[in-house]
Amino acid sequence: MKAPAFGYLRPASLAEALALLQSHPDAKLLAGGQSLLPALNLRLSQPSHLIDIGRLAELCGISVQQGRLRIAALTRHAELQASPLIAQAAPLLHAAIQHVAHPAIRSRGTIGGSLANADPAAELPACALALQARIDVLGPGGARSIQACDFFTGLFETALGSDEILAAVEIDTPCEGAVFGFQELARRSGDYAIVGLAAAGRVEGGALAELRLAYFSVGATAILATNAAACLLGTAADPASLSRAEAALAQDLDPPDDLQASSATRLHLARVLLRRVVSSMMPQQRLAA
Amino acid sequence: MIAITLTVNGETIAAQVEPRTHLVDFLREQLGLTGAHLGCEHGVCGACTIRVDGAIVRGCLVLAAQADGSVVETIEGLSDSGEISDLAQAFIDRNALQCGYCTPGMLIAAQDLLLHDPSPTREAIREHLSGNYCRCTGYHAIIDAVQATARAREQA
Ligand SMILES: Cc1cc2nc3c(=O)[nH]c(=O)nc-3n(C[C@H](O)[C@H](O)[C@H](O)COP(=O)(O)OP(=O)(O)OC[C@H]3O[C@@H](n4cnc5c(N)ncnc54)[C@H](O)[C@@H]3O)c2cc1C
Ligand code: FES
Ligand code: FES
């Protein structure tokens, strides 16, 4: 289908973009357009205007400062995938991004758009949760930061105000012993996952000293499986601990039924991913592999 | 209406577009370049694949207004310049097209891969073309054609 009619505004600066958002309450921001334009073409949304922030240099760039990695909102998926800095300072994002859509979509889609869109099946919001990312936001009242665990509030809903712009994501660069794991199950490469798991942790003396298991495509938002993680803390992810964690996953997840998979199938697949991903994170496994 | 200026297949074009017009409708209806096809218009089929500023994109998911100042290349441009003549011939030789609806998008996506990875594995070819639907060929012949082109280019 064709999109409904809308106005098109292309501010030359971030300040102008913020002012336009205030003066056009029914407008929507346009970044890479890879979620918004399909929604418009399907007539799921009817904004009065699109405010195209796609060229604002103030929202571009990847940098590391004082042990913090800062990824500006307009960083495209393809840029993230190709960045040596990301591969080194954010191995989880590097692993996840290859699963986001297809090359011709990764060339336009942005990390800011992905987080603001908050699709429950999307990879990057789950990574943000696993990495305890901080999301930097600009609004008429100035700047504020939101922790990832407070940012994703519901199905396609975030803590972003309608007059705010997501400016950047910040994460700590890996500390000593940091380990990461990422896997998803999808029918076809590049499709949204049926179930996926982004995990980050820390291994000390052969045992897991920290572990965050962020599941996606299992509910309204990405979900941290805290009960399952608790079963693995202090262990070397031995078979008995993994079995306990698998059982505990039922307290963390209550996945929906849909055309792709039933709730029970999703929970089963979440357990399969738990075993695979956590095993891959343990040093002896990685040596063996 | 929005005034845009862009380069299409090497030619500078100035035009007026409606904000909601996407690039493929602009190319097809205002410029008469009908090589880029429309299947789904929401990003899933890849029939609309074109090149913008050197990268492949979904032409149905880029507004003509967003392409102001950009360099756009379509299958017509890639064919006329000879850039993909060997790849197109390999598609014919291998029967990698039947109805041909997906072919312009497939060719552009495959050429994008070959530019970045001159000797891709079959797995890499499948991965790179994963966003392009073909409802006729069953894909194997397409993978064959891309692989044959890669090998021939390496020997050239
Ligand atoms: C066929 C297809 C398959 C896909 N598969 C996947 C997949 O497997 N995994 C995945 O994660 N994604 C997938 N995507 C979506 C893709 O990753 C998008 O790029 C991403 O979700 C949105 O980024 P964008 O820059 O294109 O945002 P846009 O489409 O421009 O915007 C999306 C929303 O975010 C808002 N927004 C954008 N930027 C900002 C900002 N800086 N501040 C505040 N609000 C903002 C917009 O107003 C809009 O509401 C797919 C898309 C398509 C078409
Ligand atoms: S028409 Fe653009 S992806 Fe189908
Ligand atoms: S040849 Fe018919 S869709 Fe590919």
Image (spheres, coloured by chain):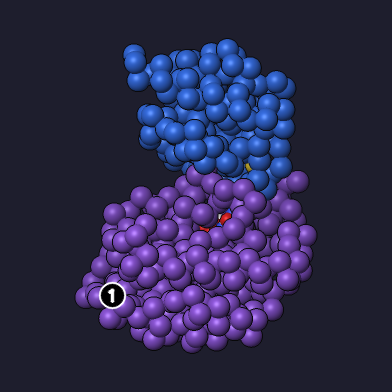
Q: Residue lying furthest front in this view? A: A240
Q: Where is residue A282 in the image (x, y as percent from the top left)?
A: 37, 70
> Which chain is the one coloured blue?
B
Q: Name the residue under label 1.
A: A177
Residue nearest the observer in this picture, A25 or A284: A284
Q: Quadrant of residue B100?
A: top right
Q: Residue at x 55, y 66 (%)?
A: A273
Q: Dot 1, how many residues are within 10 Å of its Cα: few (below 14), some (14-19), or many (20+)?
A: some
In the displayed structure, A93 sits above or below B33; it is below
Secondary structure state at the residue bearing disc 1: loop
Q: Which residue is drawn at 53% across and 13% down?
A: B89
Judging depth in this view, the residue of A64 and B144 nearest the camera is B144
**Can you see residue A83?**
yes
Question: Quarter of the picture for ligand 2?
Answer: top right
Q: Where is residue B146 in the image (x, y as percent from the top left)?
A: 50, 25
In the displayed structure, does residue B151 sit left or right of residue B2? left
Left or right placement of residue A94 versus residue A163 in this view: left
Residue A52 appears in the picture as rendered = no
Circle count: 1
Closer to the camera in the image, A260 or A157: A260
Residue at image position (63%, 66%) is A269
Q: Nearer the viewer, residue B135 or B30?
A: B135
Q: In this view, does B116 lie above or below A88?
A: above
Residue B41 position, x and y percent, is: 69, 44
Q: Callout 1: residue from which chain?
A: A
* Figure colour of chain A: purple
The image shows residue A20, relative to residue A233, as above or below, that is above
In the rendered view of the protein, which quadrant contains the C terminus of chain A?
Answer: bottom left
Residue type marked 1: Gly
What's the residue at 55%, 82% (across, down)? A244
Percent across and percent down for residue B56 are: 49, 38
